[in-house]
Amino acid sequence: MKHTNWYKDAVIYQIYPRSFCDSNHDGMGDIPGIISKLDYLKDLGVNCVWLSPIYDSPQEDNGYDIANYREIYKPFGTLEDFKTMLDEMHKRGIRLIMDLVVNHTSSEHEWFKSAISDKNSPYRDYYIIRKGKGKNGKKPPNNWSGFFGGSTWERIGDTDEWYLHLFAKGQPDLNWENPKVREEVKDILRYWLDMGVDGFRCDVITLISKKQDFKNRMPGIALVGKDAYVNGPRLHEYLHELYTDVYANYDCMTVGETVLSSLDEAIDLVSPEREELDMVFNFDHTDTDNYMGVKWLYRKFKLKNLKKVFAHWQKGLRGKGWNSLFIENHDQRRSVGRFGTDDKEYRVISAKMLASMYFLLQGTPFIYQGQEIGMTNGDFESIDDVVDVEAHNIYQLGQDVPILRPFLKKTLMSCNRDNPRTPMQWDDTRFAGFSDVKPWLKVNKNKAFINAKAAQIDQGSIYNYFKSLIEFRKGNEVIRDGEYFDLLPRDNSIYAYARRLGEKEVVVVCSFSKDKKKCKILNELKQHKLVMSNYQEKDDDVLKPFEARIYINY
């Protein structure tokens, strides 16, 4: 089968199944619930869905800890439900990509249970198990620290051996050095692709190769040892192997979650001639409001920093690979109210402006569920309202290390991963139309006026603005193939850029200010046609608070 570039014309909608729609009255989203909302997605105009994990799992990390890669988590439904959903998506012209989580499994996976119960198990070498240090091996093999805080090692019972986990204790890392592990992964890929799945979002894929010395690394503020487990020595070999043995035989796409990767490293991952991944998620723009990539260490947002990041990736990947475009996902707090915008008085205006800003860059745009109606962060009052394992680990770190408490007190509620995971707000009923019983996570009170039912009716809604953006992108060669130019790189209030292809041009002008701003660019665009804006009334050379305008000259 020919491997095409269909993803370059896709608009991808991410569904977080647990929070999307509950059909069986247990307070948790499920696959039949997703099926019931497919017409909503078709109406929005998206043509691909990224489905967060639905595999059998003990849910220590909301499905990113997989116990069986070929079965569905029972509260979400059955394999037959999944096949029905896939068929119904395809009938509507919607493709499906699934989460591929193969850096680690769940500690409840049969492979792991066998590996730690029997030293002679054939699955022993499926995981990274090393002897501890000190008397009777009671100390971890090295000083590496993980993404959820604390050591990356967990002792196996009272033995002198420890297993590696870069995330939660219930997520032991697979040993990709073992060719049998790689063959298992290929079989999993073929299982879903043969069923009709259209591709994969590859979770933390840049962590699968580790340096094999397992020595102590230089201590630092966060992630001690990352030089040993991020973009490891055999990463490209492994990814190319998956491509040639599996992906090349299907018309599918892959997007990698490339944690802590630079532009140069990303180019190596997505250059078509290398045959590894089709595109990557980079997170540099999501780090413009924190220090050193640590989201808990907040810093004041500066638009110049955001523009610099976008220019770096737009210019750097042009002609060498393909960008993914996103400002929200299941791990990132809601975008409205972030990046210097407002989620109160100017929530609708801000959400439309942010959509205009990122949606017309070069790459494939992603919409996270609820983003299209301007959902905001959860209204959590304390850690007791939060379920996320990462947040609880960080909270405990603050209890154990008092010097960190002032930093965490400010950010724990606003930055934790449950903010984008609150139940989808379908209507203004008690549980937001998500369920008719109390959901697994607190529903935001603002569902009274932020909900899909109201948004679909209101012609001036964020939802209908997204529909217009999607329609504008469709088949637009300037948006797909045009070169990127930052028109005001030093301005810290206005983001204006052009996409140019030959004589054709699209210009996007966005204000990131609560105040009116004079904009000289507007006088230069009088011969252009204004095709979209988030305000009805416009001044000739002044932008209103968080105003966005889109112009064309063809």
Image: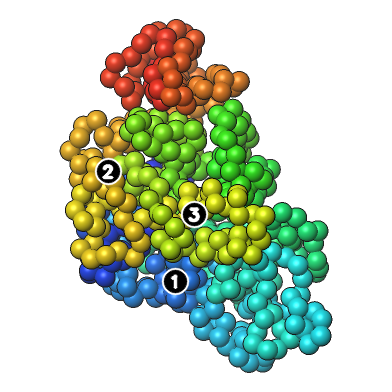
Residue at 52% of width from left, 60% of height from top? Answer: 391
User: What amino acid is at disc 1?
Assistant: Gln
Examine the rendered structure and indicate whether residue 546 appears above or below residue 186.
above
Q: Identify the mark at residue 450; answer none if there is no mark.
A: 2
Which mark's residue is nearer the viewer, 3 or 1? 3
Which residue position holds label 3? Answer: 416
The earlier-in-sequence mark between 2 and 3 is: 3
Mark 3 residue element:
loop
Which residue position holds label 1? Answer: 59
The residue lying toward the viewer, choosing from 164 and 360, is: 164
- How much space separates mark 2 and mark 1, taking CA atoms? 29 Å
- Residue 186 on image: x %, y %: 54, 69
- Residue 223 on image: x %, y %: 69, 58
User: What amino acid is at disc 2?
Assistant: Ile
Label 2 Cα neighbours within 10 Å, binned few <14 / some 14-19 / many ≥20: many
- How much space separates mark 2 and mark 3, taking CA atoms? 21 Å
Residue at 55% of width from left, 85% of height from top? Answer: 113
The earlier-in-sequence mark between 3 and 1 is: 1
User: What amino acid is at disc 3?
Assistant: Asn
Residue at 34% of width from left, 41% of height from top? Answer: 374
Q: Examine the image and state in which quarter residue 56 appears.
A: bottom left
